Amino acid sequence: MKVKQLIMCLALALVSVSCTIKYSFTGASIPVDAKTFAVEDFKNMAPLINPDLANELSEALREKLLKQTSLKQARDYNSGDLRFSGTITNYMTAPTAIKSDDVASLNRLTIVITVTFENDKDPKSNYKSGFSRYADYNSENSLSDVESTLTAEIVEQLVDDIFSKAVVNW
């Protein structure tokens, strides 16, 4: 019986040593040899431009990677083991709920982006993907009254989507 237990322990130890993915409490799984990340500043190509959005999105993604992984930020984009680049392709507001008198009771702010993720340590996880998120607001408010709050909410959701697709393998 002890021989079987010893063999099982050795097998388990061998499997755990040969593992090439490290896990964190956030659910992120990142190759063990990946040490750095880089986020290229997002480009804003939307027909309607929010001048702060590209910077907010880039910085929010950097912050999430710094806080929720053990990765360090690379000095330049090309030296990152994990690299993110993206484009804001649409930023729009439109009525979403119409009252009986053809007046909108709710408007929707939508942000659409395209992100390219490159993982030098695990190229199978590379992707180019579109993400879209929105937030509704009362039509009695102007967009300028609620824009900063809604944009922050949407950016947080988009960053969660980017992060999950890149490093959370559920």
Image (tube, grey):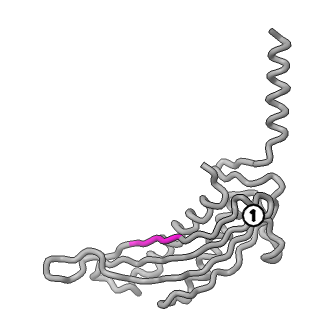
* Residue drawn at 63 percent across, 54 percent down: 168
Bounds of the magenta segment: 131-135
Q: x and y percent of residue 26 in the render? A: 63, 51
**Quarter location, residue 123:** bottom right
Q: Quadrant of the N terminus?
A: top right
| Residue found at x 56% / y 81% | 88
Left or right: where 42 falls relative to 118? left
- Where residue 116 appears, x then y in whole percent? 66, 72
Which residue shows up at 64% across the image and 81% down it? Answer: 42
Please state the horizontal and vertical placement of residue 5, each as a whole percent of the image: 80, 16
Instruction: Specify whether 144 is left or right of 64.
Output: left
Q: Residue furthest front?
A: 124
Is residue 80 shown above or below 21? below
Whether 136 is drawn above or below 22: the answer is: below
Quarter of the image for residue 74 reads: bottom right
- The tally of labels here is 1
Q: Looking at this view, is 56 or 89 the one in front?
A: 89
Asked whether 15 falls inside the magenta stretch, the response is: no
Badge 1: residue crowd in 10 Å (few <14, some 14–19, many ≥20): many
Residue 85 position (above or below residue 20): below
- Along the line of sight, which residue is nearer the eye, 89 or 161? 89
Q: Single out the residue that lies furthest toward the left.
A: 101
Point out residue 169 in the picture as x, y percentages from the top left corner. Answer: 63, 51
Magenta portion: prevailing SS class:
strand
Rendered position, 136 above or below 15: below
Does 121 sit left or right of 51 as displayed?
right
> Looking at the picture, which amino acid does disc 1 mark?
Asn
- Asked where in the image residue 138 lies, by quadrant, the reply is bottom left
Q: Residue at x 43, y 77 (%)?
A: 110
Find disc 1 in the rendering and name its residue.
Answer: 119
Q: Secondary structure at mark 1?
A: strand
